[in-house]
Amino acid sequence: MPSTARRAAIATLVSGGIVVVALALWKLLLVLALLFTAMIIAAAIRPGIDWLNRHRIPKPAGLALNYLLLLGVVAVGIAFAAPRALDQVNHALSKSGKAEIAREAKHSSGIKHEALLALQKRLQHLPKKSELVKPATQVGAKAFEVIIGIFFTFATAAYWIFERDKAVDVVCSLIPRPKRKLVRDTWTLIDLRLGAFVRGQFLLILAVGTALSLLFWAIGEPYWILVGAFAGLVEIIPVIGPLVAGALAVAVGFTASLHVALLAVGCVLGVRLLEDYLIMPKVLGEAVGLSPLLVLVSVTSVGLLFSGWAVLFAVPIAAVLVTLFDVVLRDRDPAEEETPAVIFSPKEDAI
């Protein structure tokens, strides 16, 4: 009996230890993700701060201007989109909106009928106000965690902008002198590629979201600003994001008519062609040195191995690994590698 109790106690302690270690690793993974995000943000805005510094604006003031500019863009987007989005949501949830959907479903057939029935069923199963108290508390707690994470990320990015060169010096001091220039140039190349990628993605999100919202409004797409804004946001997930956005736009278009759905297909394909031939080669090709196939494999692999949010880091991580592969295994000189200009010249980025 004593030995059995001892074994049970040991098994309990081991199981508890495994759970604690797993939770610790998970939390550590989240912290590492936030740190990596901070480094990516720093790489994206450092050229702007350096450009302002060359025009006699101190780096702290330049950092503040960059953050204020980013905050201003977000605020303007919310001020423009939020009222219209709320009106569209309220219309869908109102009695007249539900009656309109039910009437359209009754007099339709085929794919449009199935889509409207699915939407009608979803609206009927929305929770009541009395059932939202507990979820609202949970959402509030989660929102607080998100705010803390955002503050930590941008504060770390600000710190990294000023301390990166010192960190590079410390790392280089730990390796043999003949390899120091190679390490420094490799670090600079990774920084340039990540910065160009993030700036390109930011422009892509704004351009696609704005273009598709206006096109959907022109063709009479229901909830055009919601669908257009969603299409812009999911551009942050290469390859897969645009496919999901296109499918959603077509499905919503079917709730109006086959004509609107076909026009939505044309809008999505047109914007997608412009992306593929004018923007994506710069953002995903030359900027980070990745082919579309490698991007797809990276996004899919990260999505399968980790949780859904991890796909946001698939391309940056792949860009870092490809750069290291080129330098270490293919003996490429990082100082001779070129990164295309995305807002800022790569030569200016490296200063």
Image (cartoon, grey):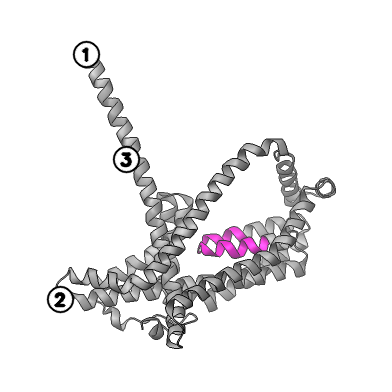
Q: Position of residue 309 (x, y in %)?
A: 48, 53
Where, quadrant-wise, is the C terminus in this rendering? bottom left
**Mark 1–mark 3 contact, CB under 8 Å?**
no
Q: Is residue 327 left or right of residue 266?
A: left
Label 2 vs 3, first from the N-terminus: 3
**Mark 2–mark 1 contact, CB under 8 Å?**
no
Give, as a three-letter code, the residue at label 3: Val
Q: Residues within 10 Å of mark 3 (few under 14, many from 20)?
A: few
Q: Residue at x 15, y 77 (%)?
A: 178
Instruction: Indicate whether residue 244 is drawn in magenta.
Output: yes
Instruction: Indicate whether residue 221 is drawn in magenta.
Output: no
Furthest residue toward bottom:
55
Cα distance in 3D space between marks 1 and 3: 28 Å
- Over which residues does the magenta segment extend? 227-245
Cα distance in 3D space between marks 2 and 1: 62 Å
Please name the residue that numbered disc 2 is placed on: 177
Cα distance in 3D space between marks 2 and 3: 39 Å
Dot 1: element: helix
Please name the residue that numbered disc 3 is placed on: 21
Q: Position of residue 186 (x, y in %)?
A: 29, 74
Task: Give the number of the disc on residue 2.
Answer: 1
Residue 140 shows in the view: yes
Q: Position of residue 232 (x, y in %)?
A: 60, 65
Give, as a three-letter code, the residue at label 2: Arg
Where, quadrant-wise, is the N terminus in this rendering? top left
Q: Residues within 10 Å of mark 2 (few under 14, many from 20)?
A: few
Label 2 vs 1, first from the N-terminus: 1
Label 1 vs 3, first from the N-terminus: 1
